[in-house]
Image (spheres, rainbow, N blue to C red):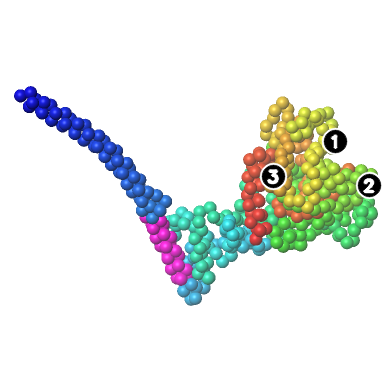
Amino acid sequence: MEKDKKQNKNLINSKNKKTKHSKGITLVALVITIIVLIILAGVSINLVLGEDGIFKRAIGARETYTIASEREYLEQNVLLYQMQAVTNNDEKGKLGKPLYDRTVENSSIWDIIVEKENSNLYGTGWNYIEKGNSIEGYGEAKYHWLVNYETGEIIQLEEDSYNHLDYNSTVAVKDGLVFNYDSANANANIDSLGENTKLYYYDAQKYNTVESRAKAYEDEKEKNVTNYVGYDRQKSENINDYLDEKTGAFKFNGNNYIEIYNENGFDFSKGLTFEFYGNILGNTVATYNGTDTNWKNFAGLFGIWNGDYSQQCYPRFLNLFASQTLTYSLWATWNPGTQSGQYGDSNPLGSWNQHVSIGDIKSKQIYLFITIDNSKVDNDKINQSIYIYLDGTLKEYSGWLLKEYYDYFVEQVKGLHYFELGRCSYGTISNWGYLKGLCYSTRIYNKGLSKEEVQDNYRVTKLFHDNMITN
């Protein structure tokens, strides 16, 4: 009996050990199974959703099919057009928007595509079909296309691989724009400069010395320009003589200038912005009587004048080569004391002049903004700023003007009728300085541009010119 009990007890213990051992094996197996399943799931997910997975392949296959489908439709459309053109020779049947090379003749319609990577340019002869546009007989375009109906070429454009530029795309800020010259839209027709805008020059061969120009000035200094008298008011009707063949930039030759006439004067009550993009290569001083070297070594960027030879062009913006400064004044007769602060510095300037040291900029490409904002007043002061891009780097100078001083300028300039680009007077009444250089664009606004607006104009203008000059 005792022996049977002992055997039963050993049997039970043996079973318990087996049971415990069996449980341990099951947990390990379960963990391994789960790990295997996770690995299999990961492999399966990667096969389906990975970079080269079934899902991506399916999308790629669908995309390939869609591209092929659209291309096939366009090929059929081109073939149909070419067949019809043999019989009726018209433009009907073309899809998309026609593109046009940037030429003098196309100044108001040019429209081009430029590929970013290789700078390939597409214009006249090509049609542009933009993604999302409706294609007759097919539906909505799923991709961007270029089609040449004469050669049969069809090019698919990848997203963000190109720039679409046209005659409206070279200036971002249009509100308040009083004058806009841009070589992108240069036109041999003088009227393309704008209403009441003329181009003048003096004969640089006939008046090739300071003395000859000074004598001509003395002979006519009592006259007014109303009847277009004056040695320096020879009128040119062919702006094409002054356009750079490659870039369309206006060539200031040191003896010519652009003049905007307004019989009611100019209204800058909201503010003023002058914008210039180009190369300042040198200058010509028409006449000179004085000892100050600054007076014979400056290039006039622009000035506002009453048309009387006995008066200076008092509101003026110029570059002084001798002192390597940008200088401007709004009026010369105002002197109530401290009226301005020098660009973040509490030290006041003199009664009217503003000087900014910009270094030697001869022959360098410069993008310049001078902006005065009269819309916001703080303690009877308004903001003035100068933004200069040299070699793609922005330099910023900020300061203030006494609002009363600026308002005085606003009232006085309403009585001035001639806004002149490329020349101004400085120092003495007869001392006119002319600009030598290429001007890619120059603009005048009757408001102060914000820093963001300045950056927008710089970006879109440079985008065009960088592409066109490269090409």
- The quadrant in which residue 414 appears is top right
Image quadrant holding the C terminus, namely bottom right
Residue 168: x and y, percent? 61, 53
Q: Amino acid at mark 2?
A: Asn
Badges 3 and 1: C-beta atoms under 8 Å apart? Answer: no
- Label 1 residue SS: loop
* Tag nearer the camera, 3 or 2: 3
The residue positioned 47% from the left and 68% from the top of the image is 78
Q: Residue furthest top?
A: 2
Residue 425 falls within the magenta-colored stretch: no
The residue positioned 74% from the left and 32% from the top of the image is 344
Distance from disc 3 to disc 2, alpha carbons, whole Å, reads 38 Å
Q: Residues within 10 Å of mark 3 (few under 14, many from 20)?
A: few
- Label 3 residue SS: strand
Residue 333 is labelled as: 1
The residue positioned 80% from the left and 50% from the top of the image is 362
Q: Amino acid at mark 1?
A: Thr
Q: Which residues are magenta?
A: 58-81
Q: Amino acid at mark 3?
A: Thr
Q: Is residue 37 visible?
A: yes
Mark 2 / mark 1, whichever is N-terminal: 2
* Tag nearer the camera, 2 or 1: 2
Q: Is residue 258 visible?
A: no
Residue under circle 2?
289
Residue 394: x and y, percent? 69, 43
Mark 3 / mark 1, whichever is N-terminal: 1
Residue 261: x and y, percent? 76, 49
Q: Nearer the viewer, residue 58 or 444?
A: 58
